[in-house]
Amino acid sequence: MSQFDESAVRALHADLLDAWNRRDAHAFAAIFAPDGLMVGFDGSQVPAGQIVDHLTPIFADHPTAAYVTKVRRVRPLGPGTALLFAIAGMVPPGQTRLNPAVNAVQSLVAQDDDGWRVVLFQNTPAQHHGRPDLVEQHTAELQQILDARA
């Protein structure tokens, strides 16, 4: 097991979301530890071994939106383990603006066993009920990142 490597954990998160944005279920699943778990936006809990079967019909039947994210913090949990927190937004296909209705917060637990792998990825809606200012702030922060890429 390696010591804490923040850049490797950030890269793992980026690779995960890049696989999603490419709509590549196999690449997305390959980033997980064999006993890993994905908790989806709808609350579904998908063991690593079932991620391909779960995502393949989603990618085949739905024009999925692309993630834009900003990592807020990465912290070690112990030797070879880390926790990443991020905010996320999604850009619908053919659009250039984020859809605030699907803003999210993301948590990722990573472990290094001869290479960093996702143990837990949780993508939770960030609706900030009763706090429209926070929805606007979340969206504006990510939109700046999106606009800078253009």
Image: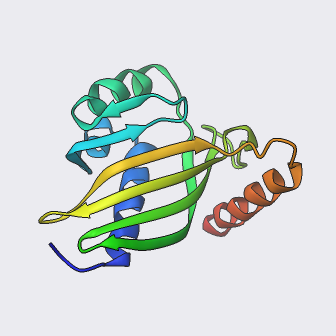
- Would you say 125 lies left or right of 59 here? right
- Screen quadrant of the C terminus: bottom right
Q: Residue at x 21, y 33 (%)?
A: 49
In the image, taking residue 107 as reference, residue 77 lies left or right, namely: left
Instruction: In the rendered view, tell whether residue 47 sits above or below residue 124.
Output: above
Quadrant containing the N terminus is bottom left
Residue positioned 41% across, 61% down in the render: 14
Q: Which residue is at 35% across, 31% downward?
A: 46
Residue 54: name its quadrant. top left
Percent of width and height locating residue 22: 40, 44
Q: Residue 95: x, y in percent?
A: 68, 42
Looking at the image, which is closer to me, 108 or 69? 108
Task: Tell me the quarter of the picture where residue 147 sits.
Answer: bottom right
Query: Where is residue 123 drawn, in percent x and y?
Result: 52, 44
Task: Pick the residue in front: 139 or 146.
Answer: 139
Point out the residue furthest to the front here: 78
